[in-house]
Image (tube, grey):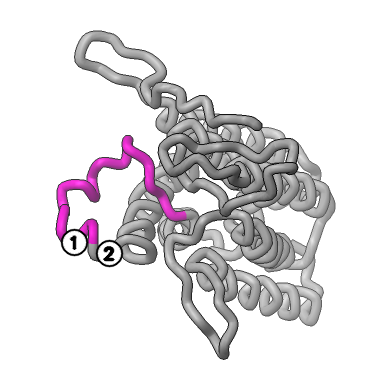
Amino acid sequence: MLIHPMPDPIALSIGPLAVRWYGLMYLLAFGSFMLLGRLRVKQAHSAAAGWRNLDVEDMLFYGVLGVVIGGRLGEVVFYHPAYYFSHPLEILAVWKGGMSFHGGFLGVLVAMAIWGKKHGRPLMEVMDFIAPLVPLGYAAGRIGNFINAELPGRVAEATLPWAMIWPNVDALPRHPSPIYQALVDGVLLFIVLWLFARKPRPRLAVSGVFALGYGCARFFTEYFRMPDYEVSVAGWTISAGQMLSLPMIALGLLLLLIAYKKSEPA
């Protein structure tokens, strides 16, 4: 049976300076945003809409702030409010891990609304452009969670070839859920979105596919992850991550309905 390697979360130490794997994964995420953004700018319909490399660089700055601030506040408010309100200084310790995608998503919405207003572009036009640039960054973040031995999976059958013991949890075989989420919520969603967004689509359509796709993918992969907490809705028990994914699924369906009802090209 596989055993989580429990690597040192510090990738490199230079005197008092410690570079953590989790931080490197975020740098990788921001780098993939920049690279994919430059490729997206070259697509004929994006170029025709006036998108430039400079826009990608500028949006990345705003997006970093949105991801970090929103992601951390989401972790605090959505998942562990009691702990962080009792240990307020820990809220600032982002290098230890603990970032909420749903919080980061809201943070990016605010950041892109500010950027769009500054540059005369509607929020949803901005979101349609950047949506395909996000999932690979999310996947990098989940790899960072795995390196940190965070987000252990639910107990799995011992016969599952990739069932893994997490020594920091117990001696039971578990699903490597961060890897599942990196592959399904990240890589698979990226492939779907990138292929969909290669051609001109109605305004809101790309954002709709992103919200719907991520919501459904996350709802599915949550079945393999130990829940932060669970809630009961009409006798149906769902995890916190699934509960937060339901509004994204509803938003995605609404955006697609509006997009294809109007059928205005992006």
Q: Is residue 39 above or below residue 156?
A: above
Q: Residue 154, how many percent across, how many down?
A: 57, 53
Please report the residue visible at 59 percent of the width from the left and 45 percent of the height from the top. 174
At mark 2, the secondary structure is helix
29 or 44: nearer the viewer: 29
C-alpha gap between disc 1 and disc 2: 6 Å
Quarter of the image with the C terminus is bottom right
Q: Is residue 229 above or below residue 8?
A: below
Left or right: residue 123 versus residue 192 is left
Quarter of the image holding residue 18?
top left
Label at residue 81: 2
At mark 1, the secondary structure is helix
Residue 69 visible from this viewpoint: yes
Q: Residue 191, how many percent across, how many down?
A: 77, 45
Left or right: residue 168 versus residue 155 is left
Tell me, yes or no, whether the two marked residues, 1 and 2, touch with CB atoms within 8 Å.
yes
Label at residue 85: 1
Please report the residue visible at 75 percent of the width from the left and 79 percent of the height from the top. 257
Q: Which residues are magenta?
A: 83-100
Q: Residue 47, how many percent across, how many down?
A: 72, 44
Q: Amino acid at mark 1?
A: Phe
Q: Is residue 11 above or below residue 42?
A: above
69 or 101: nearer the viewer: 101
Q: Amino acid at mark 2?
A: Pro
Please report the residue visible at 62 percent of the width from the left and 48 percent of the height from the top. 181
Q: Is residue 94 above or below residue 22?
A: below
Q: Is residue 89 magenta?
A: yes
Residue 133 visible from this viewpoint: no
Q: Residues within 10 Å of mark 2 (few under 14, many from 20)?
A: some
186 or 232: nearer the viewer: 232
